[in-house]
Amino acid sequence: MPLCEKTASFPSDTPFSRVETMRMTDGDVCNVTAITMSVHVGTHVDAPYHYDEQGMRIDEVALDRYMGKAHVFTVMSRGGDGVQVISADDVQRLDISAERVLLRTLTYPEYDAFHANFASIAPDAIDVLAERGVRLIGVDTPSVDEATSKTLPAHARCRERGILILENLRLEHVPDGIYELIALPLRIIGGDASPVRAVLRECSE
């Protein structure tokens, strides 16, 4: 996702803002910018510490978890009352051949308008992915849990199964298939998350 003042954040989160603290047009020697934002705005990776008080901070997670072979799948299931949930049955049908799985739900198409009706992942779906060797889940939504969840069961199940989380991907123009993922976090000491510039490259395998 682009990072700008229009980039939507969770309603209770700190939005992105940018201020030019030095400007060449004002006679300064160079242009310098300061930014303020939650580390969960835009495309980002969650550190386990985000949802586990004893979990690893973002600077402690091995970088190889965030780069390598990744499998993109289009998947969506609709539950009752318009709630969209990716179920165990939905992911059971996937022919997974990588330890990084990116789920293309197409339920959060705009980056500049927050809405709560995006697809979440059922905890038992995470169990299925873990049993098939998945170590990182990426989604094109702001969270793997429902927007209004207070218990974060999908985050908790990822913690239990040792799966890392990558959120707010832009996958609307990405065909299903196998790619090389590069989504390295910043080395924020003690951080609970980090923005990333997530890249997918064609993979010959």
Image: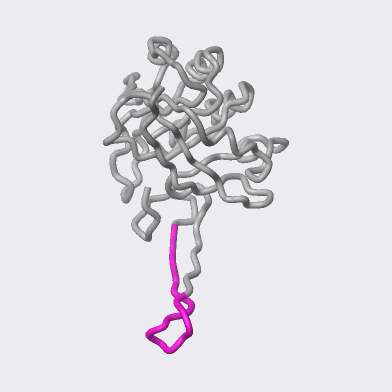
Name the colouring of the figure: one colour
The image position of residue 8, as x and y in percent, is 38, 51
Residue 132 forms part of the magenta stretch: no
Residue at position x 36%, y 32% from top?
Answer: 202
Q: Is residue 164 left or right of residue 52?
A: left
Q: Name above or below for residue 3 compared with residue 23.
A: above
Q: Name above or below for residue 115 compared with residue 128.
A: below
The image position of residue 29, as x and y in percent, is 48, 84
Residue at position x 68%, y 49% from top?
Answer: 190
Q: Which image quarter holds the C terminus?
A: top left
Q: Is residue 110 left or right of residue 198?
A: left
The image position of residue 78, as x and y in percent, is 32, 20
Give the extent of the magenta segment: 16-31
Q: Residue furthest bottom?
A: 27
Which quadrant holds residue 176? top left
Q: Is residue 151 visible?
A: no
Q: Is residue 148 visible?
A: yes
Residue 30 forms part of the magenta stretch: yes
Residue at position x 64%, y 37% from top?
Answer: 62
Which quadrant holds residue 48? top right
Q: Is 193 in front, or is 187?
A: 187
Q: Is 84 in front, or is 137?
A: 137
Total residue callouts:
0
Q: Residue furthest front?
A: 204
The image position of residue 15, as x and y in percent, is 45, 56
Residue at position x 42%, y 48% from top?
Answer: 42
